Amino acid sequence: MKKIIALCMSLTLLLLSACSMEPPGWAKPDKKESLKDMKIGLSVSTLNNPFFVSLKDGVMKEVKALGIDVIVVDAQNDSAKQVNDVEDLIQQGVDVLLINPTDSAAISTAVQSANNIGIPVITLDRSADKGKVEALVASDNIKGGEMAANYMVEKLGEQANVAELEGVPGASATRERGKGFHNIADQKLNVIAKQAADFDRSKGLTVMENLLQANPDMKAVFVHNDEMALGAIEAINSSGKDIMVIGFDGNEDAISAIQAGKMEATVAQQPELIGKLAVDAAKDVLQGEKVEELIAAPLKLVTKDK
């Protein structure tokens, strides 16, 4: 009798361990032979920012060209809403998730939920801290930060007093752009202040006003996106000071400000290309093909002269 009980327990443990190793068969998305059978879920951090509107447009143009269905949700820069949005997309039966995280740490739970039922995840512009992601489609943010710092050194000389407006704390783009900037600035510039303005134009204005009051000797500011940079320019113009502003993204308003001589430069990304490449990666994953873990979109430093 004891042997029978022991055998039953062993079989039970074996079955439980097998179940825990991978999701049940019904939860795994089938390999898609036809593109028309595919359904993509796209979660965007905010559509109140021209950069992410362009990113979404890149996705929409590519899915239309390929004949793939897509559901788009806007997190409105709310990490809790984004997690709920992604859970809803999972419930709607999407075959693959394209996620542009508001917060790289907060989105991890949603990524892991998708992992648990076998839905592949591709992130755009920002990564997820935890969970399995098939590919990150993004610019080289570290290189972009270095480009901005090197330009400051070229124009202002070494040890110039500069500041930094950071993006959303916790976003991978914030960490990486800051890391690249400090790789150069900590050696060749004097970073006298830095503060987060959450990638938001109005916050960029307010934070810049505070930095100007506290740091009258500032010669330049590196800003983690163009929206904050445009807000910072308003504050600088009101102060009457002449301070170099370098942004990041390359959106239309920033390019116009550069041509008008109000903004020095921006590290220009290609958001539409990022969206297109993400859809192409999703298609490859669903058709059983391997994709690179990092799919990079080229960067360019845009100034008035080039």
Image (cartoon, rainbow, N blue to C red):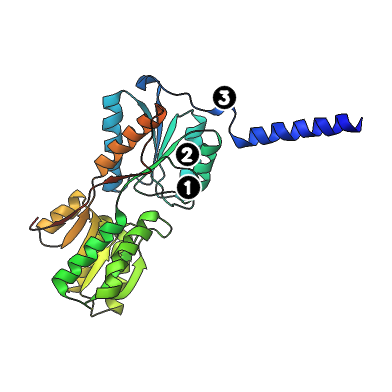
Which of disc 1 and disc 2 is earlier in sequence? Answer: 2
Q: How far apart, in angstroms, are the residues tagged by discs 3 and 1? A: 25 Å
> Seen in the image, is 76 located left or right of residue 232?
right
Residue placed farthest to the right in the image? 1
Q: How far apart, in angstroms, are the residues tagged by discs 2 and 1? A: 9 Å
**Residue at the image point whose x is 32% and y is 67% from the top:** 207
Residue type for callout 2: Val
Q: Are marks 2 and 1 in contact (CB under 8 Å)?
A: yes
Quadrant containing the N terminus in the rendered view: top right
Depth check, mark 3 against mark 2: the one in front is 3
**Residue at the image point whose x is 21% and y is 71% from the top:** 220
Q: Residues within 10 Å of mark 2 (few under 14, many from 20)?
A: many
User: Closer to the camera, 267 or 32?
Assistant: 32
Q: Is residue 251 visible?
A: yes
Which label number is shown at residue 26?
3
Residue placed farthest to the front in the image? 3
Residue assigned mark 2: 86
**Residue at the image point whose x is 21% and y is 69% from the top:** 236
Q: Is residue 234 visible?
A: no
Depth check, mark 3 against mark 1: the one in front is 3
The picture quadrant where one finds residue 264 is bottom left
Q: Is residue 88 above or below residue 67?
A: below
Residue 202 coordinates in the image, percent (x, y): 31, 59
The picture quadrant where one finds residue 24 is top right
The picture quadrant where one finds residue 232 is bottom left
Which of disc 1 and disc 3 is earlier in sequence? Answer: 3
Tag 3 secondary structure: helix
Residue 159 coordinates in the image, percent (x, y): 23, 78
User: Closer to the camera, 247 or 283?
Assistant: 283
